[in-house]
Image: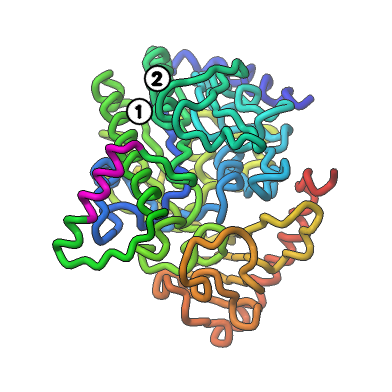
Amino acid sequence: MKHFWRWLLLGIFWSVRAGAAERPNILMIVVDDMGYGDMGKHGHPWLKTPNFDRLHDESVRMSDFLVSPTCAPTRAALMTGAHEFRSGVTHTIYGMEQMNQDCVTLADVLSGGGYATGMFGKWHLGDENGYEPWKRGFEVAVIAEQDARSKAHQRSVDPVFYFNGERRKMTGVRDDLFAQEAMKFMGEKRAEPFFCYYATYDPHGGHHPMDRFREELKSQMLKAEAEGIDLKMEKRREGFFGEVLQVDWILGKLMSFLEKEQLAANTLVCLVTDNGATGGTDIFNAGMRGHKTTAWLGGTRALAFWRLPGVLKPGVVDESCAHLDVLPTLAEVAEVPLTGKLLDQVEGRSAWGLLTGDSKDWPERTLFAHVARWPPGKRDQFRNEGAMVRRGDFDLVRIEKGSLGRAYTRNPAYHRGPTPGGDWGLYHRHDDPGQTTNLAAKYPELVKRLSGEFDRWWEKSERDLIHEKK
């Protein structure tokens, strides 16, 4: 039964292929561990990222885009259109990153609508026993070997790849090799609409950029110092920013490929990041408190750029959107209706009207985020350790100790610190992105309402946590 819905979708929507040429291709890019502030156009004081900046200028930008505080959960929401807890994903290890096999994926949806589907890069939603991407709706999938004992998944140079399960030793730089495979796929599928999912490993650790980008970073830093900017940079952060520059270069290669192959005009490029800041937290965090693995704003605000020349006019969408809105948005782009099981599964809604400017109808709703990352079987002990409820302009945050996940800062008291008394704190995220002014006493009824919504959501979410029931 686990593949029933996939084949049902294929049968229902196969007739859409006749009009396929009129629908745009989709290139979806997910960048791992790059923070909202780690690019020039977002105000970084010295880092130069020409290709991110160019995509920024050519895109509709979602300025208030919510993701999970960590990476595998965000990827699950992107793939299912629902909060990650609905697909059972609460961690990046212990098998708790495996996405429920009963879920219909974004690749299933688009494949069922007549799109060729390819996935290249960091999957992180299960790599064996039926969880692999080539068994989740992607007709072509290339991922890196995942072996915790050998740390092979950390190998940035000369990695081992799996091509739909076939193991191959590669020569070159990991993310660039993935990009080459992605471009090969797009070239081969140019006659039909394609969905190409390219997901980087960088700038996630262990930070091994090519020498050319280490040199480029040094040049940028020397120039910044000559201009009077005080750079208090640890060596490990040089590796991080070197990888940001490397990803920027790969992004430029992908954009150039689309132009050279005359695909740019009919390819929707959607680029997002998977969580908040990491290596750049203390250098520039766009005024926000928090980083990856925290429920503060800096842990959950991500990039979201959407480019489709002639259809999307560059600009800004200020409405609060989220990772769970990506699937329904792309389904609308592909003209694939959400029916059957998807009506129950998908919690997000299409933002295509916001992106095109055709509609500003975006009713207020409640969104939830949680750091999760609890050890197996310890869910209830971490109920209030990294929770966030969003409604309108307000974020209700609760952090009892700030003990989950890695620290990406020299100032943990601020970026990882608990909310006052370990209780709920209420913050206006637009007026106070640093989340230093607790408004809970000023709006007690709102706190009561939202905390009550969290309690009901938390209890209901337990039914879907498949890895808690093993």
Mark 2 closeness class: few <14, some 14–19, many ≥20 residues within 10 Å? many
Q: Which x, y percent locates residue 307? A: 33, 38
| Residue at 35%, 63% in the rendered image | 284
Residue 23 in sight: no
Q: Residue at x 78, y 44 (%)?
A: 467
Q: Up-down: is 308 above or below 393?
A: above
Residue 222 vertical placement versus 289 (above, below): above
Q: Residue at x 85, y 43 (%)?
A: 470
- Is 219 included in the stretch rendered in magenta? yes
The three-letter amino acid code for the residue at tag 2 is: Met
Res 122 visible: yes
Residue 395 is covered by the magenta coloring: no
Q: Quadrant of the N terminus?
A: top right
User: Viewer-proximal residue, 203 or 191?
Assistant: 203
> Which marked residue is nearer to the observer: mark 2 or mark 1?
2
- Label 2 to label 1: alpha-carbon separation: 10 Å
Task: Report the label total.
Answer: 2
SS at circle 2: helix
Q: Are marks 2 and 1 in contact (CB under 8 Å)?
A: yes
Residue 223 appears left or right of 465: left
Q: Locate residue 261: give its quadrant.
A: top left
Q: Residue furthest bottom?
A: 441
Residue type of the residue flagged with mark 1? Thr
Q: Is residue 79 above or below residue 461?
A: above
Secondary structure state at the residue bearing disc 1: strand
Residue 348: x and y in percent read 57, 47
- Depth order, front residue of 393/236: 236
Q: Earlier in the sequence, mark 2 or mark 1?
A: 2
The residue that disc 1 covers is 267
- Residue 368 location, x and y as percent? 61, 59
Residue 286 numbered tag: none
The magenta span reads 210-221
